[in-house]
């Protein structure tokens, strides 16, 4: 009986190892613009108020705004899949009230200001499925300059019930005002 159990164990391990080795050969290369998640919380132990999932492209020596990302054209705000914003409470985005839920964030970059758009059409790649009929809210974000960042990043600046979502890449910073409704 002991011999059968040992033989069965060896057979199972051999089968598992041959399966993992075979599937490892099919694994694609890692994404050059990995996804990241950023949360806004009122403190480190409170539940999140906002979550953003986004792709983080790199500058790689390129001229980004006005070139790779043309001014006046819709942009997915990041790389690959469109950036998703989850609001856990109702908010005011710019001046528009938005219900708690998941939205895609798009932008129309300009040299001095950007139009920031929340869309209800989620689970999309890039801007291929963007249609204005799904727009939930729009606001204007002012462009400012700051230190250089190689990878596109999104962060938050807490201002009590107000929070600014900051989009940052290269030396460009764009701020979207958000008010959390309780």
Image (cartoon, rainbow, N blue to C red):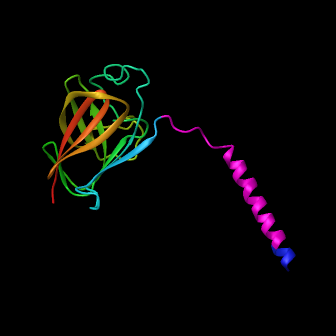
Q: Quick one: 58 or 77, which is closer to the camera?
A: 58
Residue 21 placement (x, y as % from top left): 72, 49
Q: Main secondary structure of the magenta part?
A: helix
Corner quadrant of residue 93: top left
Residue 173 placement (x, y as % from top left): 25, 31
Residue 5 placement (x, y as % from top left): 81, 74
Was residue 119 drawn as part of the magenta stretch in this picture? no
Query: Looking at the figure, which quarter contains the C terminus?
Result: bottom left
Query: Looking at the figure, which quarter contains the N terminus?
Result: bottom right
Examine the rendered structure and indicate whether residue 98 appears above or below residue 47.
above
Examine the rendered structure and indicate whether residue 7 appears above or below residue 69.
below
Left or right of 89, for residue 126 = right
Q: Residue at x 30, y 33 (%)?
A: 168
Q: Residue at x 23, y 24 (%)?
A: 110
Was residue 24 drawn as part of the magenta stretch in this picture? yes
Residue at the far bottom in the pictured view: 1
Q: Residue at x 81, y 70 (%)?
A: 8
Q: Which residues are magenta?
A: 6-32
Residue 31 placement (x, y as % from top left): 51, 37
Q: Quick one: 52 or 38, which is closer to the camera?
A: 38
């Amino acid at each position: 009986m002991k011999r059968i159990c040992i033989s069965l164990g060896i057979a199972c391990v051999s089968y598992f190892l041959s399966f993992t080795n075979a599937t490892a050969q099919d694994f694609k290369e890692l994404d050059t613009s990995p996804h990241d998640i950023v949360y806004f919380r009122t403190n480190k132990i409170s539940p999140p108020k906002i979550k953003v999932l986004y792709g983080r492209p790199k500058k790689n020596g390129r001229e980004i705004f006005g070139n790779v990302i043309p001014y006046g054209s819709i942009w997915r705000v990041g790389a690959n899949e469109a950036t998703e914003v989850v609001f856990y409470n109702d908010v005011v985005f710019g001046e528009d009230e938005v219900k708690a839920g998941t939205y895609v964030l798009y932008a129309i970059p300009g040299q001095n200001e950007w139009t920031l758009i929340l869309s209800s059409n989620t689970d999309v790649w890039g801007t291929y499925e963007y249609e204005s009929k799904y727009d939930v809210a729009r606001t204007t974000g002012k462009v400012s300059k700051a230190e250089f960042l190689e990878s596109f990043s999104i962060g938050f600046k807490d201002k009590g019930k107000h929070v600014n979502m900051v989009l940052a890449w290269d030396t460009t910073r764009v701020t979207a005002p958000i008010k959390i409704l309780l």
